[in-house]
Image: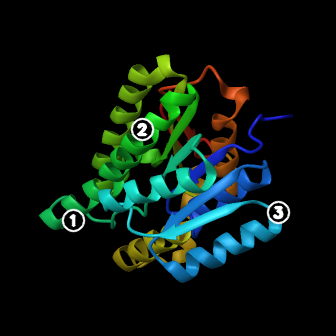
Amino acid sequence: MDLGLKNRVAVVAASSQGLGLATAAAFAAEGCRVAMCARNEQTLQAAAQKIGEQYAAQVFAEAFDVADSTAVSQFVSAVVNHFGGVDICVTNAGGPPAKGFLAATLDDWQHALDLNFLSTVYFAREVIPHMQRQHWGRIITITSITTKQPLADLVLSNAVRAAVVGLVKSLANEFGKDGILVNNVGPGFTATDRLKELAKSRSAASGKTEQEIFHAWAAETPLQRVGNPRELADTIVWLSSERASYITGQTVLVDGGAYKGL
């Protein structure tokens, strides 16, 4: 199936590892020109080089913190100067720490807001004008199953990521007339370093082994396993494609059926 993405410019945030890395690789595999960013310069450049070589792709990479609005603005400008435009923007950032409400400090709340909500605002403000001029664009946010089904000890994620969904719906409504589609993807339990950190935290609190924690998560899904990052990445690529041209303002869960609602 031709997804119509060849030579499109795809920006993928927090893409040196985990879900972001899998997403950048999936776009490169479809013939996109890929712009990657992350905080760790060495890890980022190694990932960019590997993707470029593996898929014979054009890759642009810069290290910075997505919670820095000035850095985001400068990055998007650099991408446009390098590739001539921007077609797709995938916002992403590491999740906030696993904490209950009373354990979370005000600094924790501010950091979660900056990293997991305002970073999306920063990217959207920068890429939308470019997408408007070409009357075509895709913005996809990576959040979590917690936008639909809050999880214990993840109060920061439960609250802040829900705000991203409100933003997604608002942007979809406002900029649909400009040919810009805006959607959200919510991964469930997916095999990333973030999930390993959460397993370690829950293991320390419960006395169960990390392996037991992983088995319990797998048992919560009808598919009886945790997800693979590429499964989320493939969903993002499809949502960005011409094959999903009438889908906007939606949250698509990639969770193996773990969400219990209708």
Q: Nearer the viewer, mark 3 or mark 1?
A: 3
Q: Nearer the viewer, mark 1 or mark 2?
A: 1
Give how far across and how far down residue 42 sits, in percent: 55, 83
When the figure is inspected, residue 73 is found, relative to residue 5, above or below; the finding is below
Q: Is residue 130 visible?
A: yes
Question: CA gap, disc 2 to disc 3?
Answer: 38 Å
Question: CA gap, disc 1 to disc 2?
Answer: 22 Å
Q: Nearer the viewer, mark 2 or mark 3?
A: 3
Q: Amino acid at mark 2?
A: Lys
Q: The N terminus appears in which quarter of the rendering? A: top right
* Residue bearing the label numbered 3: 56
Q: Residue at x 45, y 48 (%)?
A: 143
Mark 3 surroundings: few (<14), some (14-19) or many (≥20) residues within 10 A? few
Q: Nearer the viewer, residue 154 or 122?
A: 122
* Residue bearing the label numbered 2: 148
Q: Secondary structure at mark 1?
A: helix
Q: Residue at x 66, y 51 (%)?
A: 233
Q: From the viewer's perspective, is 46 left or right of 175?
A: right
Q: Secondary structure at mark 3?
A: loop
Closer to the chain start, of discs 1 and 2, is 1
Find residue 108 and name its label. 1
When the figure is inspected, residue 202 is found, relative to residue 34, above or below; the finding is below
Q: Residue at x 52, y 33 (%)?
A: 131
Asked where in the image residue 94 lies, by quadrant, the reply is: bottom left
Q: Amino acid at mark 1?
A: Asp
Q: Nearer the viewer, residue 61 or 82?
A: 82
Q: From the viewer's perspective, is 160 left or right of 141?
A: left
Q: Amino acid at mark 3?
A: Ala
Closer to the chain start, of discs 2 and 3, is 3
Give how far across and how far down residue 6 sits, in percent: 77, 43
Q: How many marks?
A: 3
Give how far across and how far down residue 100 sits, in percent: 24, 61
